[in-house]
């Protein structure tokens, strides 16, 4: 995916340019770089993944507008280094989490501010395979969000995957305010 495509896919779900976000499972960093562009100079992004070599090298040649912090950690482990977050982005990562309900409940309680946004980019199919072991099609994400007390997710984008005849969807929901 190109940077412009990533920006277009998630931008409607990122409402405040002075906010603090985490990109969990940042991988090569394309969505971290998209958040960098969307949030601009007032934003902060915490990129978390076990390996961030590609992103680290990209940041050496690309101008960083937002403040970007890199943490080479497994995003499924406790993350005490994260401050309270305005938003959490998980792009192509939740399908690696076996117990998505417990994981998202913990994220909601431990890291997401009241009114904060959970933004997900996932494959919209329900067949598990070696690359997507725990699929999260949009109807399942809607039920899951409701079950753990998040608002009903709103789909904000859709794109064909480069891997076969699958669609990627982007959807966001919110943690209720206190």
Image (cartoon, rainbow, N blue to C red):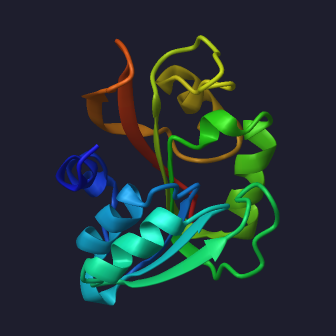
Q: Position of residue 124 (x, y in %)?
A: 45, 21
Left/right of residue 79 with respect to residue 139 in the rendered view = right
Q: Position of residue 160 (x, y in %)?
A: 28, 24
Residue 65 visible? The answer is: yes
Left/right of residue 72 with respect to residue 154 in the rendered view = right
Q: Position of residue 76 (x, y in %)?
A: 76, 54
Above or below, 115 against 163 in this view is below
The image quadrant where one finds the N terminus is top left
Q: Residue at x 67, y 61 (%)?
A: 50
Q: Position of residue 112 (x, y in %)?
A: 62, 67
Q: Residue at x 32, y 88 (%)?
A: 42
Total numbered labels: 0
Q: Residue at x 58, y 55 (%)?
A: 25
Q: Nearer the viewer, residue 60 or 89?
A: 60
Residue 136 location, quadrant: top right
Above or below, 79 against 3 in this view is below
The image quadrant where one finds the C terminus is bottom right
Above or below, 26 against 84 in this view is above
Residue 162 location, quadrant: top left
Q: Residue at x 33, y 54 (%)?
A: 13
Residue 178 visible? The answer is: no
Above or below, 4 against 143 in this view is below
């Amino acid at each position: 995916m190109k940077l412009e495509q990533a920006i277009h896919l998630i931008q409607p779900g990122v409402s405040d340019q002075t906010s603090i976000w985490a990109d969990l499972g940042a991988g090569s960093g394309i969505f971290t770089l998209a958040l960098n562009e969307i949030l601009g100079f007032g934003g902060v992004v915490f990129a978390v993944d076990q390996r961030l070599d590609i992103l680290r090298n990209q940041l050496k040649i690309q101008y960083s507008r937002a403040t970007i912090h890199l943490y080479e950690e497994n995003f499924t482990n406790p993350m005490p280094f994260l401050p309270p977050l305005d938003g959490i982005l998980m792009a192509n990562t939740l399908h690696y989490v076996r117990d998505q309900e417990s994981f998202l409940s913990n994220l909601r309680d431990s890291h997401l501010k009241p009114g904060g946004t959970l933004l997900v980019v996932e494959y919209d199919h329900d067949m598990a395979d070696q690359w997507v072991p725990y699929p999260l099609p949009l109807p399942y994400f809607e039920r899951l969000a409701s079950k753990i007390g998040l608002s009903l997710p709103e789909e904000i984008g859709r794109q064909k995957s480069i891997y076969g005849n699958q669609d990627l969807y982007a959807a966001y929901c919110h943690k209720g305010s206190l």
